[in-house]
């Protein structure tokens, strides 16, 4: 069912794009260029009627897809399907590094080197 509605939705989107591109540009925004849908003179042409029909059908399929997706999820979250943190992280015997994250990128210190660099004046 969802695949059928999605297929119809994509076909409607392509048809709507094609019909809008076929219409004549009147210049100006929001029908300011001599008639249009907002004026009394703007007699609905065949392309305008087709555009409105496709737009309504596109919105209906959008709402239908939203409802189908909401029913399919059944209130679950993606995070519910992830394993717990203690299960996903392997246990290691190595002590935590005092330098924090990224310390494994540093070269290993020689055994006789001091743990901390000497301070100035010492």
Image (cartoon, rainbow, N blue to C red):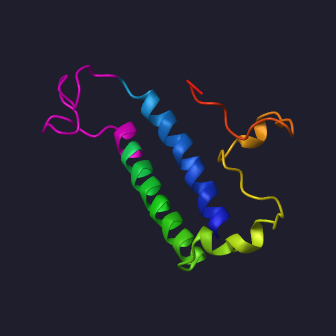
**How far across and down, in percent of the image, does residue 113 sit?**
80, 35
Please report the residue visible at 45 percent of the width from the left and 56 percent of the height from the top: 57
Quadrant where the image shows the C terminus: top right
Is 116 or 47 nearer to us in this picture? Answer: 116
42 part of magenta stretch: yes
**How far across and down, in percent of the image, does residue 71 sit?**
55, 77
**How far across and down, in percent of the image, does residue 47 sit?**
39, 37
60 vs 85, left or right, is left
Please report the residue visible at 82 percent of the width from the left and 36 percent of the height from the top: 109
Please report the residue visible at 49 percent of the width from the left and 65 percent of the height from the top: 66
69 vs 60, left or right, is right
Please report the residue visible at 22 percent of the width from the left and 39 percent of the height from the top: 37
Name of the residue lying farthest toward the bottom? 74
Q: Answer above or below: position of 33 versus 90.
A: above
Can residue 82 be seen here? no
Can residue 14 be seen here? yes
Q: Answer above or below: position of 44 versus 75.
A: above
Name of the residue lying farthest toward the left? 40
Name of the residue lying farthest toward the top? 27
Counting every numbered tag in the picture gives 0
- Magenta segment boundaries in residue numbering: 25-50
106 vs 77, left or right, is right
**How far across and down, in percent of the image, does residue 46 sit?**
38, 39
Which secondary structure dominates the residues rendered in magenta? loop
Is 102 or 51 nearer to us in this picture? Answer: 102
Quadrant where the image shows the N terminus: bottom right
34 part of magenta stretch: yes
Among the 4 quarters of the image, the one containing residue 102: top right
Q: Answer above or below: position of 5 versus 116.
A: below
43 vs 106, left or right, is left
Among the 4 quarters of the image, the one containing residue 79: bottom right
Name of the residue lying farthest toward the right? 111
């Amino acid at each position: 069912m969802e695949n059928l509605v999605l297929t119809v939705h994509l076909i409607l989107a392509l048809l709507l794009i094609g019909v809008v591109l076929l219409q004549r540009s009147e210049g100006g925004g929001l029908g300011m260029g001599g008639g249009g849908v907002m004026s009394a003179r703007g007699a609905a042409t065949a392309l305008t009627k087709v555009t409105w029909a496709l737009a309504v059908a596109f919105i209906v399929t959008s709402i239908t897809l939203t409802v189908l997706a909401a029913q399919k999820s059944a209130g679950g979250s993606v995070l519910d399907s992830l394993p717990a943190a203690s299960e996903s992280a392997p246990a290691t015997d190595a002590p935590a590094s005092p330098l924090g994250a990224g310390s494994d990128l540093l070269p290993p210190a020689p055994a006789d080197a001091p743990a901390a660099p000497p301070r100035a004046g010492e």
